[in-house]
Image (spheres, rainbow, N blue to C red):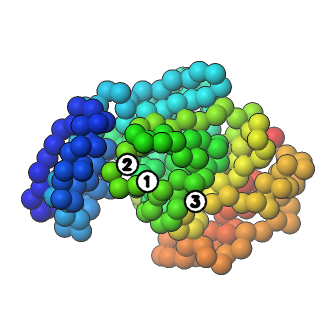
Amino acid sequence: MYNFTYHRAGSVDSAAAKLAESGDGKLLAGGMTLLPTMKARLAQPSDLIDLNEIEGLKGITVSGGTVTIGAMTRHADVAASAEVAQAIPALAKLAGLIGDPAVRNRGTIGGSISNNDPSADYPAAVVGLGATVVTNKREIAGEDFFTGMFETALDEGEIVTAVRFPVPEKAAYFKFPNPASRYAVVGVMVASTSGGVRVAVTGAAPCVFRQSDMEKALSASFSADALAGITQDADGLNDDLHASAAYRANLVVVGAKRAVAEIA
């Protein structure tokens, strides 16, 4: 690991100021990706600004049909939350499927979506449930937040402070995990919301995406049978040692049918 300067931020404003003052600073949330990358000398930030002591970034509230999760809330806390389990069971389930206990007890929702790993679970929830990402500067619609592999709509120095999930009429999450890493080879979030049916896919492509053919079919008839005959184009899907593009395409269809069958 290369040398760096460590800062412990006491507030979001303090973190933003320290980030702006640093030469090539990085924010430290759970550190599940950043720290291993630094240990392998694949990253050399000049400064680390630690967000872990900012209490205002932690916690879960459910009010007025919305579940709001602070950016520094751990995956394990979302998975164990009785309020989340009652309002959006699929979200609690998704959080409980992330990584292993060590990851869930350290990783945060803000860090996960800001990193936007193509195989992360939370992007499927943010897009599939029509969530809003709140930052220290603005609010961003979930489907506008993820712009490409490891890329987001965040501007330089912008910090995610919370994610707001509208409570759906019903939703379910299917995940086919990599047996070693537990990352999603394919994950599918299916939700029936006040704004219509949403199907979001993670793991299959370089970035989370909505499956519009399935959304149209499920809008006409919300049943697994409605997805009969619908296929997922393999062009542009990830194709690596973990799974071929064709295999992932098939998993998208299988996953969507299983998710729908769970709640139809």
Q: Is residue 165 left or right of residue 31?
A: right
Q: Amino acid at mark 2?
A: Glu
Q: Is residue 95 visible?
A: no
Q: Which mark is residue 154?
A: 1
Image vertical order of residue 64 relative to residue 198, above or below = above
Disc 2 to disc 1: CB gap under 8 Å: yes
Q: Which residue is mark 2?
A: 158
Image coordinates of residue 78 in percent, x first then y, are: 48, 33
Q: Nearer the viewer, residue 33 or 149?
A: 149
Disc 2 to disc 3: CB gap under 8 Å: no
Q: Amino acid at mark 3?
A: Val
Q: Amino acid at mark 1?
A: Leu
Q: Which mark is residue 208?
A: 3
Q: Quadrant of residue 3?
A: bottom left
The residue that appears at 81% across and 40% down in the rendered structure is 264
Image coordinates of residue 201 in percent, x first then y, are: 63, 57
Q: Is residue 248 left or right of residue 149?
A: right
Q: Quadrant of residue 91?
A: top right
SS for dot 3:
loop
Image vertical order of residue 27 relative to residue 170, above or below = below
Q: Nearer the viewer, residue 178 or 78?
A: 78
Quadrant where the N terminus lies? bottom left
Residue lying farthest to the right in this orientation: 220
Q: Quadrant of residue 106?
A: top left
Q: Is residue 82 left or right of residue 100?
A: right
The residue that appears at 24% across and 37% down in the rendered structure is 14
CA gap, disc 3 to disc 1? 16 Å
